[in-house]
Image (spheres, grey):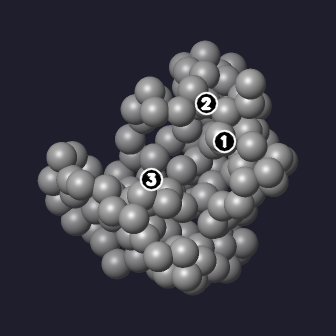
Amino acid sequence: MATIFSRIIAGEIPCHKVAEDKDFIAFLDIRPINGGHTLVVPKVETDYLFDLSDDVLSRMLVFAKKVAGAIKEVVECKRIGLMVIGLEVPHAHIHLIPINSEADMFNKARVEWDKEKLSLLAAQIRETSSNLI
């Protein structure tokens, strides 16, 4: 059975896409830790990030770096934190989270965001990322 991320990639489930190329997609988390919280997902369905080939993993990190740059241009923050959890969806992915302190990454309640607000933020990041990717 396809994961929710595979269904997003296939266009079966809508998302707030911020960037995409032939191998990866990045979209806003609908329950973000902080505004701009983005998921970077390979289009190949692989459960565990470290089961990706070295080539795919390295290209994914380069893609994520460009997306992080776009997020940082739009969302006021000191840095973009990177987190790999990998248990919530059985499809490899990276969390990019705008942060101002370490506490912003951990033990913070996730919040439901209004679809309109997510859509606007995604458009701003997408516009910025199109210059980078």
The amino acid type of the residue labelled 1 equals: Phe
- As helix, strand or loop, the secondary structure at mark 1 comes to helix
Q: Is residue 3 above or below residue 46?
A: below
What residue is rendered at 28% in x and 68% in y? 78
Label 2 Cα neighbours within 10 Å, binned few <14 / some 14-19 / many ≥20 = many
Give the mark count: 3
Q: Nearer the viewer, residue 84 or 88?
A: 88
Image quarter of the N terminus: top right
On the image, the x and y values in percent for residue 25 come to: 69, 51
Q: Are marks 1 and 2 in contact (CB under 8 Å)?
A: yes
- As helix, strand or loop, the secondary structure at mark 2 comes to loop
Q: Is residue 124 above or below residue 89?
A: below
- The tag earlier along the polypeptide, 3 or 1, is 1
- As helix, strand or loop, the secondary structure at mark 3 comes to strand
What residue is rendered at 21% in x and 46% in y? 106
- The tag earlier along the polypeptide, 1 or 2, is 1
On the image, the x and y values in percent for residue 22 come to: 84, 48
Which label was assigned to residue 91? Answer: 2
Q: CA distance from mark 1 to mark 2?
A: 7 Å
Mark 3 lies on residue: 96
Work out whether residue 133 can be spotted. yes
Label 1 Cα neighbours within 10 Å, binned few <14 / some 14-19 / many ≥20 = many
Which label was assigned to residue 58? Answer: none
Using the rendered view, name the quadrant where residue 20 is placed.
Answer: bottom right
